[in-house]
Image (cartoon, grey):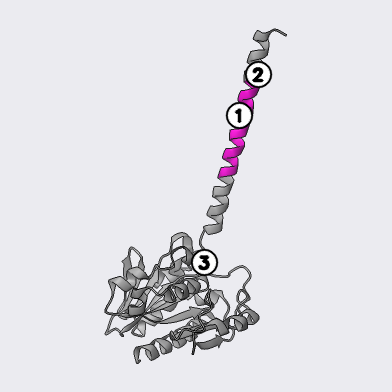
Amino acid sequence: MSRKTARPQTLVASRRFWLIFFGLMLFFAASVVFYVWQALKPIPPAPEALGALSSDSAVRVEARNWGYLLRPAGEAARVGLAFYPGARVDYRAYAPVLRQVAAAGHPVALLWVPFNLAISDQDRARVVLEGYPQTKWVLAGHSMGGVAAANFAASGDPLVQRSVAGLVLWASYPQNDLSSRTLPTLALFGGKDGLLTAEERARQIPRMPKGTRVEVIEGLNHAGFGAYGAQPGDQPADIGQPEGWQRIVQATVAFLRRVDSR
């Protein structure tokens, strides 16, 4: 074979190699992007959640660049609730429950978080604390949202020290040991929670701030704190959604009123 014949064949083989190589790299990159997109895709809110984001005679709903502000139509209490959503759950799914908290007289800031992961922006509530300094805020969250709320509450940030009056955890617990803290705290759990078991709950309660009020709502599961349907790994609830929401609201509002009366 002459050198003239061998050289074109070598070039063709080289081009073929690089085409295959870059094709595989492109396929791998596309697969990673698709996997990440699927992993971060939020569980959508139920129709009643979207319906709860409309104003009426009891609650005024205002869209903000950080989420939604739900305000009582009448006189508002001095203490409001700044709420972080659970991981991979569309934040609007919590509107039906939080709307009832607002209707009871407490302003509620429903926070949007990047990538539907509250831990990606744990001081997300800062914009609310800065924007509404006349209100004392209780940081709150469901599941991973509660972890973010607890981390921000315990951050030692001067703004938090001035503006945060308490912590509410729905099916959640602090990432760090806060047992030496005296921050007023409410920890609500579901008795049928398949993601946060009774055994795990028992291990985590001693790590909560001093004097934490712990309540277990029997029959309530993990997904029952919002309106987004069933959640993988969870147990079926033994109580209806309206009853579960009512009991969550009752416990949360009672806590907010205790904080407001201090």
Q: Position of residue 62 (x, y in %)?
A: 31, 70
Along the viewing direction, whichever of 261 and 110 lies nearer the viewer? 261
Q: Position of residue 259 (x, y in %)?
A: 38, 88
Residue designated by label 3 = 87
Q: Main secondary structure of the magenta part?
A: helix
Amino acid type of the residue tagged 1 in the rendering: Trp
Residue designated by label 1 = 18
Q: Is residue 76 in view? A: yes
Q: Local crowd at mark 2 within 10 Å, few (<14), some, or many (≥20)?
A: few
Residue designated by label 2 = 10
Magenta residues span 12-29
Q: Local crowd at mark 3 within 10 Å, few (<14), some, or many (≥20)?
A: many
Along the viewing direction, whichever of 189 and 4 lies nearer the viewer? 4
Residue at the image point whose x is 52% and y is 66% from the top: 87
Amino acid type of the residue tagged 3 in the rendering: Ala
Label 3: state its secondary structure: loop
Q: Local crowd at mark 1 within 10 Å, few (<14), some, or many (≥20)?
A: few
